[in-house]
Image: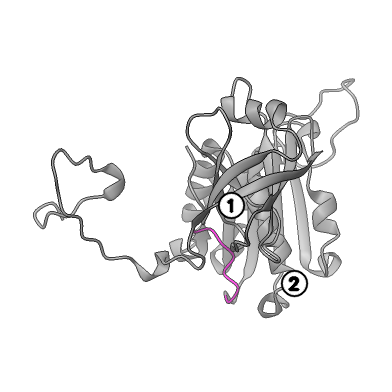
């Protein structure tokens, strides 16, 4: 590639004027061309002690695929913040995000503490390749950690109403540090056909010790380990989507490759 003067665009730093030619992989062609659009904060609600859901009303319709994300530009904050949509596109006018407060984070501080209902921000999107493959002839696995719950909820919402996936089972795994960090099960249980086709598993890595409040009787450990324990060799025949902190994402990817899941059946967007 170097002898042909081919370079990775994300790692190349031009040092003089240059001409750029690229060939776009058909798999990377956007289903919805990204655009900048203004949006107004319509509502917010608490999901956990540090994870909130924010709903924005767009100034013009813009559609997205379940699992995609947007770049948000907040007043007084340098640079953009990447947030995944947790809802379905619907009429393209409402985008909902689940955002975790990051201690010392300028973006989350601006969002949580300085952005009132009715405030306007700029959004740029949609982006991402980890969108729901509606025609995949396989059962589905969604693996989420932290605010990675948002895109996985969007995928689950779409998968449960997609006619082409009506015979597919959805396995949904959510990993949290403590019991207080768990959320999302109520939304999943309310989805059409959930009782018959959805299998939800919550995993806690730091359960309460004896005498520290209500006991945790569910799985303990890391979410990728629980996925491997429950599904094992079945994973190779499934379509897998995941989102979460970088450490979790790396562990999940390694586990899936070790389990023999073809890369074409693994869908995620890396955030660092």
Location of residue 106 with respect to 268 vertically, above or below: above
Location of residue 90 with respect to 247 vertically, above or below: below
Q: Would you name the residue on which mark 1 appears?
A: 242
Q: Position of residue 167 (x, y in %)?
A: 72, 78
Q: Quadrant of the N terminus?
A: bottom left
Dot 2 falls on a residue whose secondary structure is: loop
Question: Which dot marks residue 24?
Answer: none
Residue 127 visible from this viewpoint: no
| Residue 130 in magenta stretch | yes
Residue 249 visible from this viewpoint: yes
| Residue 64 in magenta stretch | no
Res 204 quadrant in image: top right
> Label 1 neighbourhood size at 10 Å, few (<14), some (14-19), many (20+)?
many
Res 98 quadrant in image: top right
> Label 2 neighbourhood size at 10 Å, few (<14), some (14-19), many (20+)?
few
Between 8 and 179, the one nearer to me in the picture: 8
Q: Residue at horizontal 25%, vertical 61%?
A: 22
């Amino acid at each position: 590639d170097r002898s042909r003067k081919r370079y990775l665009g994300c790692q190349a730093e031009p040092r003089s004027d240059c001409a750029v030619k690229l060939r776009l992989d058909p798999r990377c062609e956007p289903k919805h061309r990204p655009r900048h659009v203004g949006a107004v904060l319509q509502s917010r609600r608490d999901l956990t002690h540090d994870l909130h859901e924010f709903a924005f009303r767009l100034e013009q319709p813009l559609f997205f695929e379940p699992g995609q994300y947007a770049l948000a530009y907040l007043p007084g904050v340098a640079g953009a913040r990447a947030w995944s949509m947790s809802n379905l596109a619907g009429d393209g006018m409402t985008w909902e995000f689940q955002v975790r407060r990051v201690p010392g984070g300028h973006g989350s501080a601006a969002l949580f503490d300085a952005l009132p209902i009715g405030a306007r921000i700029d959004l740029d999107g949609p982006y991402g390749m980890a969108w729901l493959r509606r025609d995949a002839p396989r059962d589905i696995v969604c693996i989420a950690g932290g605010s990675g719950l948002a895109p996985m909820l969007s995928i689950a919402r779409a998968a449960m109403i997609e006619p082409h996936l009506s015979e597919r089972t959805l396995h949904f795994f959510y990993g949290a540090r403590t019991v207080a960090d768990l959320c999302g099960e109520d939304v999943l249980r309310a989805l059409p056909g959930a009782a018959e086709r959805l299998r939800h598993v919550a995993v806690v890595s730091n359960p309460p010790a004896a005498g520290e409040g209500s006991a945790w009787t569910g799985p303990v450990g890391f979410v990728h380990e629980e996925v491997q324990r429950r599904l094992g060799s079945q994973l190779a025949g499934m379509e897998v989507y995941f989102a979460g902190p970088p450490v979790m994402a790396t562990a999940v990817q390694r586990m899936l490759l070790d389990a023999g899941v073809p890369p074409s059946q693994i869908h995620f967007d890396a955030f660092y």
